[in-house]
Image (spheres, coloured by chain):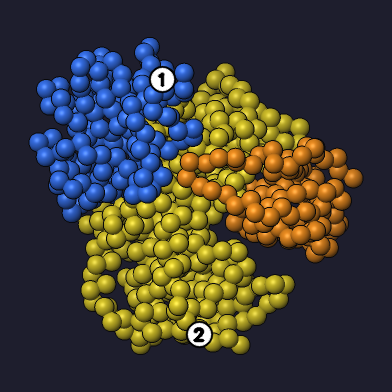
Amino acid sequence: MIEKDLVVIGGGPAGLSACKVALDAGMKVAVFERSFLLGGQLVKQTHKFFGSESQYARTRGIDIAKILIDELDNTDLEVFLNATVVGLYKDNVITVYQDSKYFKVKAKSIIIATGASEKFLAFENNDLPGIYGAGAVQTLMNIHGVLPGKEVVMVGSGNIGLIVSYQLIQAGAKVKTLIEAAGKIGGYQVHASKLKRLGVDIITNTTVKKAVGDGKLEKIITVKLDDSWNEIPGSEEDITCDALCISVGLSPMHMLLSMVEANMAYVGELGGLVPIKSCDYETSLAHVYACGDVTGIEEASSAMVEGKIAGLMAAKHAGFIHPDYEKLENELNNQLCILRQGPCGEKIRCGLKKVGEVYD
Amino acid sequence: MIKYNLKESGEDMRIDEHPILIFAKDKKIRFTFNGKEMFGYLGDTIAAALVDNGIMEFSKSVIHERPRGFYCAIGNCGSCNMTVNGVENVKTCLTLLEENMMVENDLFEVIIND
Amino acid sequence: MIEKTGVATIEMIKSKFPKKEVLTRPKAIIECYTEIPCNPCSTSCPFDAIYIGNDINQIPRIDFDKCTGCSSCITACPGLAIMVAMIKDGKAYFKIPYELLPLPVRGEKWTALNRYGEVLDKPCFIENVMVTKKNDRTAIVTVSIEQPYLYDFVTVGKKL
């Protein structure tokens, strides 16, 4: 059985940031990633990032991924790609599935940075081919250079819906419209303005009632919603399209933590089921830490900072004190406070309060 | 046998020019889908190459046999599972295309014990 | 309405512009209306003309006396929400961020778009297109249009 000081599950912004700090603290680290490349969802983020310099603001996500990966060059990090962690056990053992084989790894500490998956939306024929998660479309067009369709409708006006719509236009697709069930746009105003000035209408109080098509999507039927989210009869409209992107939020990928019976809580503001964790990011299981979207849906900027804190703390509790421990601890917590300070951070602050964290 | 809506050529959904990205199209890769010859590029996942070749239907739902397409692209949803080189249930969204790969819709019978 | 449509009211837009007398020199117009955690406009400014402060959620405040219209902030803004405007000889000149293809070419005539994506009655002229490594794939396009469209123009649409 492979033995490590630290196993990091998930090679996205949180996981890679955790690896870096833990390696700097002197730990022997392995990272397990389900995909064939590291970087998580950063590898398809073609836009420049928000935040401040410490979170690589104004750098494109694709380039942030490169920075995080380059930082791990010439370290002892052991990287397992195409490696799905399928089991987590109470004696800090994980089971990994790679190349049609299963193997076990034991670690002094484990950091869960599994991220999130896209939520789905219930409507008639929502399984028709041509209906995609917005993130999947981003993968398809920004990693592989393949468009999902020529005429696209986006559902959901959070940042992902707004950004992916803009990126569809950059890739040469036509975004016919963006619909949003709530009464106002969910994401940043600047993203919405960018779309609107290119003539994409953002239609609020509207949802998908039904998808229509023979074997694949041909059109959707939308319906208006009243203030109590009830459908308004007679307000149906047809929109022809060959792709529909669903961008209605993300859910933390809690499955490993749930299977090992960590203390969990369902917190709507955080996107779903999240682990209860200490201020050192330790879950209810000793030496099992969690960071990034699996502990609550936020921007990648916060995930990177959380990853660093988790790495720092996992190292500390295993007896590896980072040379800049105190400076880093202060700085990182301060960065998180600032990122979560404004009105955009209200939801996450409220959610974190429910799992015992306080941001004032 | 399912009837598939096949376009004649690949490259249909390929992005030619992009303001931010450059897509390497260094090496063409031949593969077959349900026996039909198709082409993708080195670095494509099987799923991306299929979408480019106009394939929308990746699998069928177990009970009602409803067509299912590519959905999540992160290995989560199972909609894109196919038989690759005889191995069933391969996540085509996370599997890179290789020369002469044989890709097929999963055709095995699913037994459900209700 | 901006939270419903993504379009600011004319009063909001005008609040981001300096007085017309000041626009005889190029000045940055920062169309950032809501608090988001972001500060590259401020940190990129070589003249300390844009202030955000420690709480990066604050809306940027610009000092038009210090702003030289140098356009550093245009490509730093991740929201593509900054342009530089100037008035000269009855024409409004803009430097805008542009991340679409095809890129305009100097000397071309393009349709001008307002914040609703509507085509304005008068076209705009491409005065210059700047693509530099530092700007990281965000082109800066300089256009001119008749001065009455100062508060309407936001980007270019199609080549005419």
| Location of residue C122 with respect to A224 vertically, above or below | above
Could you say which disc has been placed on residue A4 in the image?
2
What element does badge 1 sit on?
A: strand
Q: Position of residue B2 (x, y in %)?
A: 86, 43
Residue placed most toward the observer, B66 or C30 = C30
| Image quarter of the N terminus of chain B | top right
Circle 1 residue: C109
* Residue A106 visible, this orientation: yes
From the viewer's perspective, is the residue at label 1 or at label 2 nearer? 1
| Callout 1 crowding tier (Cα within 10 Å): few <14, some 14–19, many ≥20 | some
Q: How many marks?
A: 2
x 61%, y 88%: residue: A1
* Residue A120 visible, this orientation: no
Q: Label 1 sits on what residue type? A: Lys
Q: Is residue A287 left or right of residue C69?
A: right
Residue placed most toward the observer, A14 or B8 = B8
x 20%, y 17%: residue: C89
Q: Is residue A127 left or right of residue A59?
A: right
Residue B92, by quadrant, is: bottom right
C-alpha distance separating marks 1 and 2: 63 Å
The chain to which mark 1 is attached is C
Q: Position of residue A222 (x, y in %)?
A: 57, 27
Which shade is chain C?
blue
Chain that appears orange: B
Which shade is chain A?
yellow
